[in-house]
């Protein structure tokens, strides 16, 4: 398995948790789309996400 380069490491640093693994936001974990967001993001905006509770 190839290792990440310096640029890729810096890009993924926001997603790495305490034990060194990539961790995504709760809403993004089960999503099939590739627009994953970090677990550190407080507010998640995803144009592909539609809540089942939304009325409109």
Image (cartoon, rainbow, N blue to C red):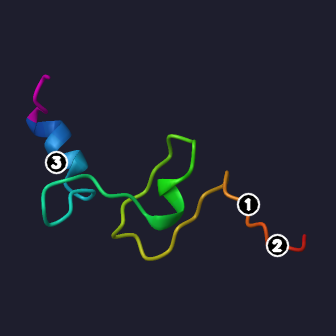
Question: x, y (%) of residue 7?
Answer: 16, 38
Question: x, y (%) of residue 28?
Answer: 50, 56
Q: Main secondary structure of the magenta part?
A: loop
Marks 1 and 2: CB-CB under 8 Å? yes
Mark 2: which secondary structure?
loop
Q: Residue at x 60, y 58 (%)?
A: 46
Marks 3 and 1: CB-CB under 8 Å? no
Mark 3: which secondary structure?
helix
Sequence-wise first label, 3 or 1: 3
Q: Which residues are magenta?
A: 1-5
Marks 3 and 2: CB-CB under 8 Å? no
Label 2 sits on residue: 54
Label 1 sits on residue: 50
* Rendered-image quadrant of the C terminus: bottom right
For residue 19, which quarter of the picture?
Answer: bottom left
Picture layout, residue 17 above or below residue 35: below
Q: Residue at x 50, y 40 (%)?
A: 34
Q: Residue at x 53, y 53 (%)?
A: 30
């Amino acid at each position: 398995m190839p290792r990440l380069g310096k640029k890729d490491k810096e890009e993924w640093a926001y997603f790495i948790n305490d034990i060194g693994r990539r961790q995504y936001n709760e809403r993004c974990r089960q999503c099939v789309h590739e627009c994953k967001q970090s677990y550190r993001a407080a507010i998640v905006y995803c144009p592909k996400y539609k809540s089942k509770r939304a009325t409109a």
